[in-house]
Amino acid sequence: MASDKRLLIRGGLVVDPSQNLEAQRDVLIEGGKVRALLAPRESARAAASAEIVDAAGCWVVPGLIDLHVHAREPGGESAETLASASKAAAAGGFTTILAMPNTEPALDNPALLELLKAKAERDACVNVLFAAAATVGRKGGRPTDIARLAAAGAKALTDDGRAVADAGLARRVMEWAADCGLVFIEHCEDESLGRGAVAHEGPAALKKGLAMSPWAAETSVVLRDIALAELTGCRLHLAHVSAAQSAAALAWAKERGLAVSGEVTPHHLALCEDDVPGQDANFKVNPPLRGKADRDALIRALKDGAIDAVATDHAPHSPEAKAAGWASAPPGVLGLETAVGVVLTKLVHPGKMSKKRWVESMSAFPAKLLNLKSKGSLKPGMDADAAVIAPAKSWTVPDAFLSKSRNSPFVGARLKGQVRATLVGGRVVHAL
Ligand SMILES: [Zn+2]
């Protein structure tokens, strides 16, 4: 995927927590790698012989890495494909995405993994990595062949969409994952606490008369898995943390020195149960939007590091599926194309999170978690994956996306901060 061209990203403020850098630098790229970071007065000679990417007034950051994307291939191609998900990713400043295995069929065997890797290589304009299912068919019955999946290049294990409900089975999966050096990503939800639930157990859903699931459905599995991580030594990552109590549990696991991390979605950072207009299914997500106090606790936890990453849980669904009404529509919203705008508007611009902490949560940390040694940083020698972001640019989220779907709760929202260009391996894959 790397390009041989010489490129100079010129005039921007480089924000790169991996080298504790926030300064005016021009980024010189050669052979698909970062060659040098040049102070503006040093870059005139390089500029004469390189193609210029204009970043005046912009922030230049290491390419964003999304730990949670539903690319829907195979089986859900009417809602998204590897090609369309990668275009949406590029437009959102993401240069690497981790695709979830809850496809049809589930990604639970090395042959399908090889096929999808080859397809992504052909179709996708960003790096696509794959998480494999933890149990066969994601059915929670028996573990997949974890050693062979690891050997075939799976980057993580998860039954995302549901938890591995049986604790004994979760323990075996985590022991095996630990042996193979894979991260186990848990979707924390005890379904027995909210069968048929379509909303958070709180005042808003009570008023609407919706079937509800309490915060404890999430936190009980969070606490169980933290215990199993300590027991097995497995690297555990908690998907889409949504409750204040879960964030507190993560902070406790870190105090104990455990290798446990967590992510939060832009929609759980920006919205709460009170923000759902009527029964608009474009706001229906799993885990559900919770209370205002939860949202505020998630923002604080992300700022202070109890929660490590922002991941989108990009979950495309066709307009027909989402038109089925609140009770029947599948949960999930788009995330790739709005994440930067939402997080800058809601957190970074209002001073709730620093620029460096933001980049750490969306690039440096995900690279570390997935053991991507040449990503998540703009140090010389690293892959030339980068995003150029116009922080002050205001825009209104349109009703059309590069994703094949349109199920975003942010359609019509006014956001401040727009991705101007995205580079993967020194090649421009998105430019406005
Ligand atoms: Zn999930």
Image: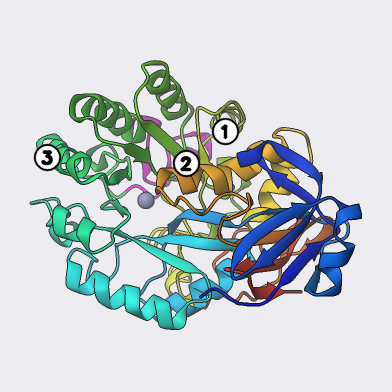
Does residue 336 show up magenta in the picture? no
Side of 127 relative to 3 (left or right) = left
| Image mark for residue 263 | 2
Q: Residue beneath label 3, please?
A: 172
Q: Is mark 3 within 8 Å of ligand 1?
A: no
Marks 1 and 2, the one that precedes in the sequence: 2
User: Pointer 1: what residue?
Assistant: 302
User: Which amino acid does the dot numbered 1 rest on?
Assistant: Leu
> Which class describes the residues within 10 Å of circle 3: few (<14), some (14-19), or many (20+)?
some
Q: Is residue 263 left or right of residue 31?
A: left
Q: CA distance from mark 1 to mark 3?
A: 30 Å
Estimate the x, y position of residue 16 in percent, counting from the top left.
Answer: 67, 44
Mark-to-mark CA distance, 1 and 2: 8 Å
Asked if the magenta segment contains residue 208, the reply would be yes
Q: Which portion, as a residue range, is magenta?
A: 197-216
Towards the viewer: 167 or 431 = 431
Q: Amino acid at mark 3?
A: Arg
Q: Tell me where residue 177 appears, x and y as whole percent.
A: 21, 44
Is 211 situated above or below 99? above
Which is more toward the observer, 186 or 45?
Answer: 45
Q: Compare marks 1 and 3 and give the one earlier in the sequence.
A: 3
Q: Nearer the viewer, residue 353 or 411?
A: 353
Q: What residue is drawn where x is 41% and y is 22%?
A: 254
Q: How many angstroms separate mark 3 from mark 2 (CA)? A: 24 Å
Q: Residue at x 25, y 30 (%)?
A: 229
Q: Say which quarter of the image contains residue 122.
A: bottom left
Q: Is residue 329 visible?
A: no
Q: Is residue 7 above or below residue 291?
A: below
